[in-house]
Amino acid sequence: MTLTFLKNLLTTPGPSTQETRPAKVWREEAATFADEIRTDLRGNTFAILNGGAPRVLLAGHIDEIGVIITHIDDQGILWLTNIGGWDPQVLVGQRIRLLGKTGELIGVIGKKAIHLMKPDEREKASKLEDLWIDIGVKSKAEALEYVRVGTVGVIDAPLYELPHGRIVSRSLDNRIGAYTVLEALRLLSVDRPVATVAAVATTQEEITLAGAETSAFSFDPQIAIAVDVTHATDYPTSDKKLRGEAGLGTGPAIGTGSVNSPVIHEMILQVAEQHQIPYTVKVNPSASGTDADVIYKSRGGVATAVISIPNRYMHSPNEMIEMSDVENAAKLIATFIRTLNSETKLIPFLA
């Protein structure tokens, strides 16, 4: 696995609708081995290995949650709202890296200090409308030299390597999915399959799923695999009875139910068993909460699977994964794709 590439990908800011920076990192890496690279109007970036039938789409979204400036007051204080699903408690006291007019700059999330709160205020959770960003300026005019309404930002959190091949970083949801699909394509470029395969770094999954919808329509696959993160269930207070077994180091979680094709699900399970690739099963009784939710119904329908990387502390500046799960996910995807040919049956039926 190419860890330098991964570190660059994770640390490059790119919240939903503003994914061009990480997409450039992904595209430059893909160009070292893919047959074809292209980017569409929605900002989706495709890396393609040309072949025959079937056509397979591997989707991992490259956007991340973030913030956007909604107002600049006379003192130069920036007011904000969320891009994607934030718990406002996570933002309190954080530093924000803003993608400003002339480059990146740092601001801090401000909030009334606990010393100044009334007793009842201390018991209440912070609301987004009670938080602001302070970039250290003294006036609105000065602030406007650096930012504008609509400027976006992300939490300024570095990546750290921990024991057992574990890493913590912001944006693992879901740069790790975009990374995994490209690593699977890299494996396939060495031992090429019969199929035509496109890895795509999709945009806007955290807010609209628009990137997945348009990329699936334009590529017109028969088979698709969406790679995302799933909530790990090996931390205190997690309910395994409700959410299943998905610990760090237990392998990729293979989705079943809802958008998942039962045919593809069984094929992937067989590949995992035959090649002794560790895995767990993730039950999705309704929507999967991934790009697969729109891909599976593209055009006349796509035989779709969801493969997920267990992730602790999702939508925080310190999401945690184990790299062995990523390696096994890429291996599982590549091995599965090598089993496909023009005769592969995809329609579910009773024998």
Image: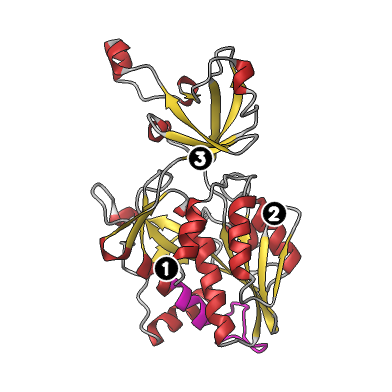
Give the residue number, with chain letter if any, for mark 1: 326
Question: Observer-nearest residue: 74 or 313?
Answer: 74
Q: Is residue 343 magenta?
A: yes
**Mark 1 or 3: the one toward you:** 3
How much space separates mark 3 and mark 2, taking CA atoms? 19 Å
Above-or-below relation of 220 to 239:
below
Q: Label 3 amino acid?
A: Val
Question: In the depicted view, which residue is nearer to us: 29 or 16?
Answer: 29
Left or right: residue 174 versus residue 302 is: left
The magenta span reads: 329-351
The residue that appears at 50% across and 74% down in the rendered structure is: 265
Q: Quadrant of residue 243?
A: bottom left
- Front-most of residues 316 and 258: 316
Quadrant of image for the N terminus: bottom left
The disc placed on residue 253 is none
Give residue 43's mark. 2
